Image (cartoon, grey):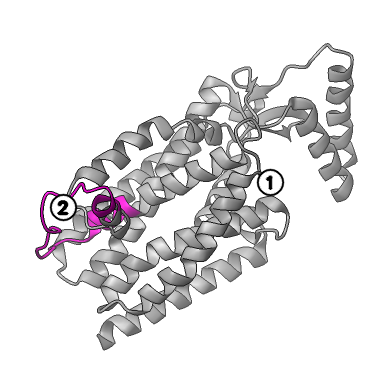
Amino acid sequence: MIIGSGHLFMITIEHFDMKISVREYAHPGRKGGWHGDVSQRVEIQKMIDKRVASGEEKEREIFQKAQLSLDKGDGFDFNMLPVSAFWVMCTLVSSMLALLLLVFSRFTKNNVLQTLMGIFAGFCAWFTVELGLTMAARQLGVAKRFDIYNSMIIGTHGEFVLLKYSWVFLVPVLLYLLFQESVRCNMFVFLRRQFNLMRGAVATGRIDNYAPRVAFFFSSAVWFFYVVLLLAFDERIFGATSWFTFLVFFICFSCSGYLFYRLLKQASFGANLRYAIGVALVFWTDIEILEKWGAMKGPWLTYQPHTVVIFITALLLGGVMIVRETRRS
């Protein structure tokens, strides 16, 4: 529910940004460049089909004019939205929340509370990354999809293009985690043993503050799975229905059952929560793939009152259950 709420929270920020930043968005931003997984013609046809299904005739006509221009070989220009003050403020607030949660985690010795603070600090840190990449995409003119604002076609979702190519930064992070023997992640311990990279026994010792570790684990794990999915869905590399995407789906689906079994074997509630992060992210990868295949439609991708109520209620219920279990422990 936290992962799904992250998507929904991003949609909510975009919704309020469009309402609040009307004056700033009255003037178009930088000229956009197309970096989508498919051609402009294919993407525009998707937008036309979507408007036909929803009955938005005016927007459909705008996309049809762009399609006609492409058919004539003239092409068409589009712009990005500028970076609004509200967007900058949201980015700063989320980064400050992540910092404050990590600072305050120093004042509690309860490993469950530390874990929860780490989870939400990692959530805020990753949210800051997404907001920042959106600002960068708007400033650089990077577009992956089209939308309409103020009767004009605009480029959107360029942050996913930048995120996809961030794999070059992810590689050194993974290499560091692989060879840093104080990292006790099961996957890296398994790889060290299989490739004879262990210089001694697995590092042991009491951990006094879980929050920074959990925050790093949460944000870096989300980053890893994001990059894997974006590379898998890129039609120029693999494609949504390629063997690689099916392989990722099969591996995650197979591992989910085993990881859930291991989750039930954790000795303490704090350890259970920390292990649940990996279990949820592996399982969520299959949900993302199913949504991409059209097998399901994620309610976390649309801003609807009932969707917001469902997710907020579920998060509150989960919070109450965690508090009860913490007191019981």
229 displayed left or right of 96: right
Say which of 55 and 167 sits in front. Answer: 167
Amino acid type shown at disc 2 = Ser
Lower position in the chain sequence, tag 1 or tag 2: 2
Q: Amino acid at mark 1?
A: Thr
User: Residue at image x 32%, y 56%?
Assistant: 187
The vertical placement of 15 against 276, above or below, is above
Q: Nearer the viewer, residue 280 or 54?
A: 280
Would residue 1 be visible to someone looking at this image?
no
Residue shown at the point (82%, 44%) measured from the top left: 50
User: Percent position (x, y) of residue 202?
Assistant: 15, 59
Q: Residue at x 20, y 58 (%)?
A: 104
| SS assignment at label 1 | loop
Labels 1 and 2 touching (C-beta < 8 A): no
Badge 1: how crowded within 10 Å, few (<14), some, or many (20+)?
A: some
Name the one closer to the observer, 219 or 65: 219
**Span colored in magenta:** 191-217
Report how far apart the C-alphas of labels 1 and 2 lie in the structure: 39 Å
**Residue hosting label 1:** 241
- In the rendered structure, find residue 267 and report the number of the disc placed on it: none
According to the picture, the residue beneath numbered tag 2 turns out to be 182
Does 177 appear above or below 218? above
Residue 195 on the magenta segment: yes
- Residue 60 to residue 315: above or below: above
Residue 30 position, x and y percent, is 59, 18
Relative to 58, 139 lies left or right: left
Secondary structure beneath label 2: loop
